[in-house]
Amino acid sequence: MTVPFEKLRSEFKRVLLSLGFSEQKAEICATTFAENSRDGVYTHGLNRFPTFVEYVKKGLVNPGGEPTKESAFGSLEQWEGNSGPGILNARFCMARAIELANENGISCVAIRNTNHWMRAGAYGWQAADAGMIGICFSNTIANLPPWGGIDPRLGNNPLVIAVPRKGGHVVLDMAISQYSVGKLNQYRSNHQPLPEPGGYDAEGKLSTDAAAILQSQRLLPIGFWKGSGLSLVLDLLATVLSQGKSTAQVTKTENESGVSQVFICIKSDSGEHSSHLIEEIIAYTKTSRLVKEGESISYPGENTLRTREKSLKEGVLVDEGVWEKVLGL
């Protein structure tokens, strides 16, 4: 079923206000959750909202928590998240990174003791909308085995790289596993096989069965050992730059709360030469022969724009069961 975007946002805001969020904070969070579903990232929009509410009720997310600056050195800053809502802390940090990059050309803002920021790509779009190249990443609870291991010891640490573009920003938003945990849960709920193997079953065989992969906890890292290494260094960077909790420390709490995040901005040259280079790269990429006739090659973020347009015209696609649950909150 579909729900109008404004209806989705208003229901989210209603629930957040009942949980003690201020009018402004409820509006920002509700809009972000609704935009995530609008853009097709259902796993971190409507589908994640009940979990967010649960974390607020448990006291893991503090609706009144505000970020406070801990230290600064030039265009590098460290902030304390004070257990505030991850969406609000992330939007604040990216806004601060944009401000510092406007002054210095480049910036890095790191935050500790914050919470899940929902769709990571939202902050890449935020940077690109401001004309900035944006890079951001977060550590998470351990849910990915290191290469050669069986037990989860790495975070599925999302990485975002965004490049502003007049015809539609290029925004890479990726988990470090072949499929994010949220996407695996979505396939499991829909009783659908994965398009490609996403991990191992209990017998150690590559599988397209999301339920079997979630049960074994053996998600497949992107690029095999390379993804494993990338997850490790992202955790190192997020922890060291923020002086916050590592994946190991977050995992000990048994809740994905108190994570560490980094936001980097680079002032982009918006001149005709840079625009030409970007278009040349995208155009050249699309000249490849297709695996299947009738399909197309898309740059990161292109399908997001198509989904966004369709959602605003026809309504946002929702899981009826989750939607009814939100209406009852």
Image (cartoon, rainbow, N blue to C red):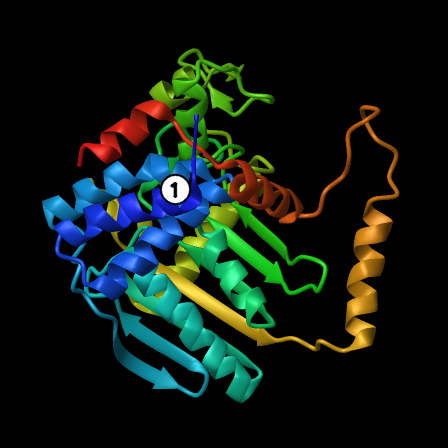
Percent position of residue 150, x then y: 39, 27
Where 314 falls versus 66 (above or below)?
above
User: In this figure, what is the number of numbered marks?
Assistant: 1
Quadrant of image for the N terminus: top left
Q: Nearer the viewer, residue 3 or 275?
A: 3
Q: Nearer the viewer, residue 178 or 306?
A: 306
Q: Quadrant of residue 165?
A: bottom right
Percent position of residue 36, x then y: 44, 46
Which residue is drawn at the image coordinates 72% and 42% (left, top)? 298
Q: Is residue 226 left or right of residue 232?
A: right
Q: Tell me which amino acid carries mark 1.
A: Gly
Which residue is drawn at the image coordinates 43% and 62% (left, top)? 237
Q: Quadrant of residue 51?
A: top left
User: Callout 1 environment at 10 Å: few (<14), some (14 to 19), or many (20+)?
Assistant: many
Quadrant of image for the C terminus: top left
Percent position of residue 266, x then y: 58, 74
Which residue does the numbered mark 1 point to in the structure image?
Answer: 45
Q: Is residue 7 left or right of residue 54?
A: right
Q: Nearer the viewer, residue 200 or 131?
A: 131
Where 223 falls versus 112 (above or below)?
above
Residue 139 seen in the current view: no
Q: Is residue 257 left or right of residue 168?
A: left
Where 236 falls versus 73 (above or below)?
above
